[in-house]
Image (spheres, grey):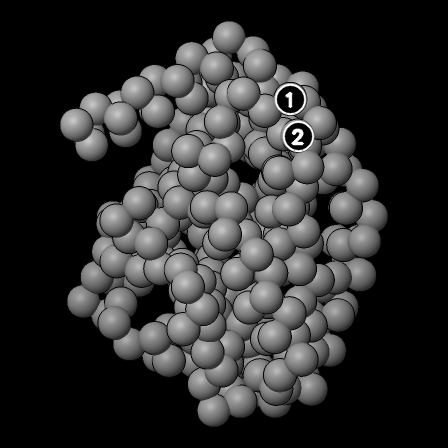
Amino acid sequence: MCGEIFYQNINNTYGLIRIERPEKRNAISKRMVEQFKRALKQAKHEQMNCLVITGAGERMFCAGGDLTYLHGNLTEEEAFQELYQMKEVLMDIVSFPVPVICLLNGDALGGGCEIATACDIRIAKEGTSFGFIQSTIGITPAWGGGILLYEKVHPSFAFQWILEGKIYEGQYLQKQGWIHRLISEDAWGNLESMIEPYISKSISLMQTLKEQYKRKIASLALSAEMNEEIRNCAKEWHSPAHVEAVNTFLERKKTEHI
């Protein structure tokens, strides 16, 4: 167990990272960013066919960043530095030496979709929905995931999704190529069955195929573009739309604790 980011290596066959904060919709806190980094660093040096990233609970894979620490009072530079930490997590996922499989146990919003997009394969439970909703609160994707989205689906659809900020059902996103496979709720509990195509092959083959894919998407070149996206997000941190959205969220949380 690693705080709210759970990591274990299953018999040198696959690694498992689980976001363990269901009471907060698995939102990523500042502490969890460091836990995520440590889990990925540890996993990188262990034997495995693939790495699995999923969330705890049945409702939400990840709701994005926890706004109680990503608040509107940050300066532009402070916002950039905070957001950059999760960009490093996403790049660690993109550059991971074997395939990274995202098991979307529930919905994902904002940064949750960015984490999923950084993964190589996205497998979702039927009935789940996903949204790059950042534009609806006055910002760009905050961790560089928008840049990654342009690599994972047709650029025209990526632009539309980021621009409109809509929430789509998994079935529609499978047609767009963002979701690779949908699994019924009844079959969801059998994790090793879901990842069988990735754990049934040799580690060396998985490493070779992942390295080939990384060269195809020019993973190193993506980093600079992701930095620019984060810088653009930081510039919008004090926009009226974003400040209002953050304040509304914080006031609602304050009311819930009265």
- In the image, taking residue 155 as reference, residue 53 lies left or right, namely left
Alpha carbons under labels 1 and 2: distance apart: 5 Å
Q: Quadrant for the N terminus, please.
A: bottom left
Q: Mark 1 belongs to which amino acid?
A: Thr
Quadrant assignment, res 206:
bottom right
Quadrant assignment, res 131:
top left
Is residue 189 placed above or below 32 in the rendered structure?
Answer: below
Quadrant assignment, res 203:
bottom right
Residue 144 appears in view: no
- In the image, taking residue 218 as reference, residue 110 lies left or right, namely left
Q: Residue at x 77, y 46 (%)?
A: 223
Numbered label tally: 2
The location of residue 71, given as percent across then percent down, is 49, 27
Q: Do residues under tags 1 and 2 come within 8 Å of each other at their CB atoms?
A: yes
Helix, strand or loop at disc 2? helix
Q: Which residue is drawn at 34% across and 18% down?
A: 248
Q: Which residue is drawn at 39% across and 18% down?
A: 247
The location of residue 88, given as percent across then percent down, is 67, 51
Q: Which mark is residue 17?
A: none
Is residue 131 placed above or below 42 in the rendered structure?
Answer: above
> Mark 1 sits on what residue?
75
Is residue 48 placed above or below 147 in the rendered structure?
Answer: below
Q: Which residue is drawn at 62% across and 83% down?
A: 46
> Mark 2 sits on what residue?
78
